[in-house]
């Protein structure tokens, strides 16, 4: 198995490892030659326990490790990025500034970072994510959708393909 380029997905609180966004984005990644891993975090609703679960898997790639997170999974991927130092961090409606989460000011660690967030997100305010992106100089796409971003999946697939291609071109 070629482990040069690997994407690890972290699903949201009420989703699972094979939700519609992950399945669609996994296909994009595989078409670009990435191996795909999608751990199942449903055994706990504790975000920081999920971070530990991801780190315990010891994600790695020979060349390019990419962490992808949706909602709570965005928090998980961002916190784990400090230790894993991935080449890419792709976040969809990341659950930042949730009072019960351990880290209120998460710092992303990756060479390439992209956030997609919805204007009508009723769980994580767009203003919070705008401020986060501004603070860390991160590219941000704000879309006319809700927290689950389902209506924007075709656009997210295009953005993810471009994101992964950019990472692959850096090594060339």
Image: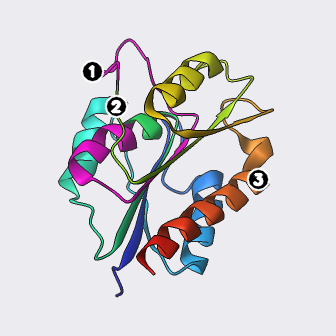
Q: Residue at x 25, y 43 (%)?
A: 82
Residue beneath disc 1: 102
The disc at residue 167 is none
Residue 171, image x, y percentages: 41, 76
SS assignment at label 1: loop
Relative placement, left or right, of 7 versus 3 is right
Q: Residue at x 67, y 56 (%)?
A: 159
Mark pair 2, 3: CA separation: 27 Å
Residue 103, image x, y percentages: 29, 22
Q: Residue at x 34, y 28 (%)?
A: 106
Residue beneath disc 3: 155
Which region shows up in magenta? 76-105
**Residue nearest the viewer, comparing 55 with 49:** 55
Mark pair 1, 2: CA separation: 8 Å
Which numbered disc, 1 or 2, marks the residue closer to the eye? 1
- The N terminus sits in image quarter: bottom left
- Compared with 55, 171 (above or below) is below
Relative placement, left or right, of 47 versus 118 is left
SS assignment at label 3: helix
Magenta span contains residue 100: yes
Residue 123, image x, y percentages: 60, 19
**Residue nearest the viewer, comparing 122 with 89:** 89
Q: Earlier in the sequence, mark 2 or mark 3?
A: 2
Q: Earlier in the sequence, mark 3 or mark 1?
A: 1
Q: Residue at x 33, y 35 (%)?
A: 44
């Amino acid at each position: 198995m070629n482990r040069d380029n690997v994407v690890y997905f972290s699903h949201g609180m009420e989703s699972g490892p094979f939700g519609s966004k992950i399945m669609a984005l996994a296909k994009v990644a595989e078409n670009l030659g990435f191996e795909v891993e999608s751990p199942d975090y449903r055994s706990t609703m504790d975000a920081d326990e999920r971070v530990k679960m991801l780190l315990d898997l010891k994600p790695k790639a020979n060349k390019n490790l990419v962490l992808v997170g949706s909602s709570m999974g965005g928090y998980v991927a961002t916190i784990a990025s400090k230790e894993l130092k991935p080449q890419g961090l792709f976040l969809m409606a990341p659950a930042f500034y949730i009072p019960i989460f351990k880290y209120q000011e998460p710092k992303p660690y990756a060479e390439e970072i992209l956030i997609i967030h919805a204007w009508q997100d009723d769980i994580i305010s767009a203003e919070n994510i705008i401020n986060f992106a501004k603070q860390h100089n991160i590219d941000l796409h704000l879309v006319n959708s809700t927290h689950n971003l389902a209506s924007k999946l075709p656009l997210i697939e295009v953005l993810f393909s471009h994101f992964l291609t950019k990472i692959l071109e850096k090594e060339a």
